[in-house]
Image: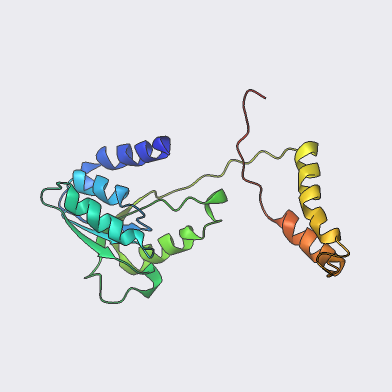
Amino acid sequence: DSVRTGTYRRAIMENPDDFRGQTVMDIGAGSGILSFFAAQAGASLVYCVEASSMGEVIRQLADANSFPGATFEVVNRPLETIQDEVKGKVDCLVSEPIGTFLFNERMIETYLCARDRFLKPGGKMFPNVGHLCIAPFSDALLHWEQQNKNGFWKNTSFYGVDLTAALSRCTTEHFRQPIVDYINPDA
């Protein structure tokens, strides 16, 4: 997503005093792109916290690119389990904790945990605020499509199994979930 990535890069590069010579922690680092932006802005040490195998990709990209004066420490485990891998407190946190409505991917909790455990008093967070703008609407076609998907639970003989006993519970669960989709502006 070039718009989101470009916005993060601008935020970091337009605030060089928050990064120059500082220790930064990138939470949920993924490919490490925010870590690399922090290094480009002058960070001296970047902790790249990434629980998945993408931690190896961060190491590979850091080795393949030149970031003079920057050291990358890849912490390849969940932030909540970090003990001695991070030495002291950090000056700045960067993360992309944006799931559906900020909360769906549960990254916001990890970001706040990082703030509480690792950020120095007066340290900076990128981002440090989030706004939700919600506009309710009704879409009869979308509702019909979802009802049809949920119709699976009306099967009285799905490979010899009657699923109807779970219909009520599964309908409730199905309609609890947000529907995240692209809305065609030309439609």
Give the number of marks: 0
- 148 or 178, which lies in front? 148
Q: Is residue 29 left or right of residue 87?
A: right
Residue 121 visible in the shown view: no
Q: Residue furthest front?
A: 159
What is the basis of the colouring in this image? rainbow
Q: Residue furthest right?
A: 156
Q: Could you say where residue 115 lies in the image, as x and y percent from the top left?
A: 37, 62
Residue at 31%, 37% in the rendered image: 10
Q: Could you say where residue 18 lies in the image, as x and y percent from the top left?
A: 24, 48
Q: Could you say where residue 102 lies in the image, as x and y percent from the top left?
A: 52, 51
Q: Is residue 99 left or right of residue 126?
A: right
Quarter of the image where one finds residue 154 = bottom right
Quarter of the image where one finds residue 49 = bottom left
Residue at 85%, 61% in the rendered image: 155
Viewport quadrant of the C terminus: top right
- From this view, report whether residue 12 is shown above or below residue 122: above
Viewport quadrant of the N terminus: top left
Q: Is residue 162 left or right of residue 27?
A: right
Q: Could you say where residue 105 lies in the image, as x and y percent from the top left?
A: 52, 57
- From this view, report whether residue 101 is shown above or below residue 173: above
- From this view, report whether residue 42 is shown above or below residue 123: above
Quarter of the image where one finds residue 177 = bottom right
Q: Residue furthest top?
A: 186
Q: Is residue 101 left or right of residue 135?
A: left
Q: Residue furthest bottom?
A: 83
Residue at 77%, 63% in the rendered image: 170
Residue at 83%, 66% in the rendered image: 163
